[in-house]
Image: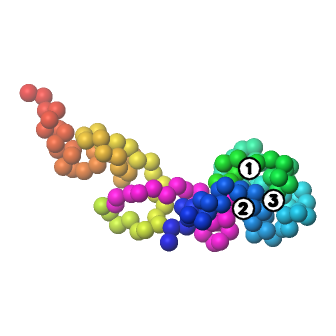
């Protein structure tokens, strides 16, 4: 099961970010209606860290969302979804990552975290993740074809 993609149920909850935020606060061990400044700062810090947000969201922002005075924005709802995943014991880096389709020719296990950036092949334009930083072609065959086409006569 891929835990880093919102399920249909989670996507439906995007509409109700307030309820999701209340669940997150409860998962962190606090009562949302009686959470104090320190409690909400803790949750805001966790949400900000998982979203890479600096400066972090304030405890007041969370309180206003819980009290239905503010509508939660998409970034905090996405952070809440990712924090929910992390709180279930999934590694934080996986929760921070984006799930995409990848075609692997090597030994890449399902659910692997790819740390390198992809780039287009200098020969055919196919996007690939290079093995080394100065790799220009996705395969030897593509490199040979490129050199054959660009051979100086």
Work out whether mark 1 precedes mark 3 in sequence or the reverse, and give the earlier one.
3
In front: label 2 or label 3: 2
Circle number at residue 42: 3
Where does label 2 land, which residue? 20
Q: CA distance from mark 1 to mark 2?
A: 10 Å
Residue 57 picture location, percent across and down: 77, 48
Quadrant where the image shows the C terminus:
top left
Work out whether mark 1 precedes mark 2 in sequence or the reverse, and give the earlier one.
2
Residue 153 vertical position relative to residue 99 in the rendered view, above or below:
above
Magenta-highlighted residues: 80-104
Q: Residues within 10 Å of mark 1 (few under 14, many from 20)?
A: many
- Please tell me which residue is depicted at 25% across the width and 41% down the height of the picture: 124
Work out whether mark 2 precedes mark 3 in sequence or the reverse, and give the earlier one.
2
Asked if the residue at tag 3 contacts the one at tag 2, i.e. Cβ–Cβ closer than 8 Å, the answer is: no
Circle number at residue 113: none
Q: Is residue 79 visible?
A: no
Residue 10 vertical position relative to residue 55 in the rendered view, above or below:
below
Q: Residues within 10 Å of mark 2 (few under 14, many from 20)?
A: some
* Of residues 68 and 63, the one drawn nearer to the viewer in this rendering: 68
- For numbered disc 2, what is the local secondary structure? helix
Asked if the residue at tag 2 contacts the one at tag 1, i.e. Cβ–Cβ closer than 8 Å, the answer is: yes
Where does label 1 land, which residue? 72
Asked if the residue at tag 3 contacts the one at tag 1, i.e. Cβ–Cβ closer than 8 Å, the answer is: no
Residue 59 picture location, percent across and down: 84, 52
Kindly indicate the quadrant of the structure image that contains residue 103: bottom left
Residue 148 picture location, percent across and down: 13, 38
């Amino acid at each position: 099961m891929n835990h880093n993609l919102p399920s249909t149920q989670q996507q439906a909850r995007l509409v109700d970010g307030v309820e999701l935020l209340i669940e997150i606060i409860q998962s962190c061990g606090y009562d949302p209606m009686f959470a104090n400044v320190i409690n909400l700062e803790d949750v805001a810090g966790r949400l900000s860290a998982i979203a890479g947000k600096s400066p972090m969201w304030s405890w007041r922002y969370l309180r206003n969302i819980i009290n239905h005075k503010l509508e939660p924005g998409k970034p905090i709802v996405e952070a809440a979804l990712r924090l929910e995943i992390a709180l279930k014991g999934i590694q934080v880096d996986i929760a921070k990552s984006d799930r995409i389709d990848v075609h692997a020719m090597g030994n890449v296990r399902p659910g692997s975290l790819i740390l390198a950036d992809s780039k287009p092949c200098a020969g055919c334009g196919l996007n690939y993740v290079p093995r080394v930083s100065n790799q220009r072609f996705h395969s030897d065959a593509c490199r040979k074809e490129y050199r054959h086409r660009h051979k100086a006569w």
